[in-house]
Every structure is written in C-alpha cells, then in structure tokens.
Amino acid sequence: MMKFPKIDFPRLKSKLQVKSPWDRIIISLLSLLITIPIFIILHQNLRDLNWSFNLDRVFIFIFVFAAIFFLLMLLRTIIILCVAVYLLVLFYGTVIGNYGFSEISEDYNSMIYTMSDNPFPQDIIVAKLLPFPNKSKIINAIEYQNPKVRNFAIMATTKHFKGIRGYSDYRTTIQCFAVFKEINSRWNYVNDPKEGDYIATASESLEYFSGDCDDHSILMAAAIRSIGGTPRLIHTKGHIYPEILIGSLIDLEKVNYLIKNVLFTKESYGKKIHYHIDERGQVWMNLDYTATYPGGPFLYEEILGELTLK
C-alpha cells in the first residue's frame, strides 16, 4: 500500500504567514499616521486622569497604535497594494505639478496642527471625509476659462469700484468683490426640477442669472477664478455657497476696512463680517447669494464639506 508523506500543517501555516520586513515597516508608518489624529481626538474628549508623566495618555497612544497595527496587518495584502497605488498617484501628481507628495504632507501637517488646537478635532476629520455632492459635475461646470465667463467678470470690474485708488495690494480682491456685487444684484433664485439636481454651467447661468444655490456658487466661483481670485465652495445642510480666499488675519483687517468704509458702506453698516479660518490659518469670506455684502451672514453655520478651486 502506497504511503503519502505527512504534512506538517502548523509548520506550513507558519511559512505561509511569513511577513516581509518591508510589510511591517510600511504598516508601522501607516499605523502611526492614523494613530496621531485618533489620539488627538481621544485626548481632547477623554477625561484627564492626571497621572504622573501623563502615563494615561501614553497608554492610550500605545493601545491605539497596537490596535491599528494589528488590524492593518490582518489586511496587509490589500493595504500594501492600496499604498502602492496611492504612491504612484502621488508620484504622477508631483511630476505633472498637481496634487503630490509635498501637498499631501502639507495638508496632513496642517490638519494635525489645527486638530491639536481645536476642542472638537473630530469635526475636522468628518468635514474632510464627507463627500461633496455632485463634485465632478460642479468642477466641470465651473468654466473659468470660457471667454463668456471672463468677459462678464471683466465687465463687472469696469462697472463697479473702478475708481478705487490706494489699495494696489488688494486690487484682485476688490475686483472679485465687483463680480460679487454684479452677480448678487441680478441673481434670481429658481428651484431645480423635482426629479433631481440640475447643475447649470457658468456660461449657461450668465444668460438669465437664475438658478439655485449650486448654480449661483458655480457662476461665482468661475467668474472669480477667471480674474485671478481663489474661490471655494462650502457644503452645508441642504445648501452650497461660495467663499473667497482673503489671506491672513492681517489681510482680513484691511479687507474688513475696505468693505465697511469704502466698497459696501451702506450694505454692511452696523453688521458683522462672517468668515472661516481653515487648517492652514487662511481666511475665507462668505459670498452667498443671500448676502448683500462680502462676509454677509451664513445661511447655515456647520460645514459638511468644502471644494477648493486653485
């Protein structure tokens, strides 16, 4: 009778589970990057036990790191493959001058810096993870290179605030405010069809200056970008509105003076300027269709997502 050799299953299993040293290194680095923001959230929300040398926080960090490391190691094949693909995407972005290694490093550092000073750091993570509605359609609809859009923006700059002198450092901002004044003085709010969202292009909205909040935001963003401004769109509960990059807090003081005393004196008299400060410390000012001056009141305060156009 023919005998088959015995198979040592435990030994075979251990051989199949042999892990490359590079796997552990990659998983360790990834675990550390994930652990840091999670630890900040736990640190801000858990009670401080006042242990010597902050040992309670040290134990929390070690526990979170170990748990994430163990979980990622269980899924290491998929994780390593995803990391490899993502690195290739970042390398391609770096080569062609789009979003690459330096940008993701800057964004991560800025996020950690902002979370460390925020009493609700989880809100920053949530805002970045939530999807922006109709993102691809909106990006395609912001036709800032369309001649009709740029010609409209140029017309607005010759119609409003052309005679303002002495603020050369804020010329682009003043011209973008001229675009805001022209659009908001003519905008007519019209609902989308009941069947769903209708995303109008910027050039389409120029014909009648009518549409809902996303149509207004698209036109505003396209016109502002066409003359050198930096807009972004903010997604809140059931609403989208545009903002413009002002710069630093020092810039905010000067722009606030311009709005209150030079450009929108009547509209902003006795009223507050509304803005957001992002994770990089940059100031963004509200340009919603509901506002009669830049920095008008927010329709909804909570930010669920943002789409920056550079």
Image (tube, rainbow, N blue to C red):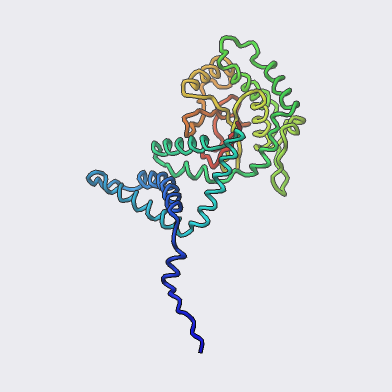
Q: Nearer the viewer, residue 129 or 304?
A: 129
Q: Nearer the viewer, residue 45 or 51?
A: 51
Q: Nearer the viewer, residue 161 or 51?
A: 51
- Give the residue drawn at x 47%, y 39%: 108
Number of marks drawn: 0
Q: Nearer the viewer, residue 168 or 104?
A: 104
Residue 209 percent across, percent down from the top left: 73, 30
Q: Which residue reaches farthest front?
A: 2
Above-or-below relation of 264 to 234:
above
**Image side of residue 268 versus residue 190, left or right:** left
- Give the residue drawn at x 43%, y 47%: 29
Residue 179 percent across, percent down from the top left: 66, 23
Residue 3 percent across, percent down from the top left: 49, 85
Above-or-below relation of 284 to 23:
above
* Quarter holding residue 206: top right
- Give the residue drawn at x 46%, y 30%: 281
Above-or-below relation of 134 to 224:
below
**Image side of residue 109 versus residue 238, left or right:** left
Q: Which residue reaches farthest right?
A: 207
Q: Which residue reaches farthest left?
A: 52
Above-or-below relation of 145 to 34:
above
Residue 52 percent across, percent down from the top left: 22, 45
Locate the C terminus and report the quarter of the image it occupies: top right
* Quarter holding residue 184: top right
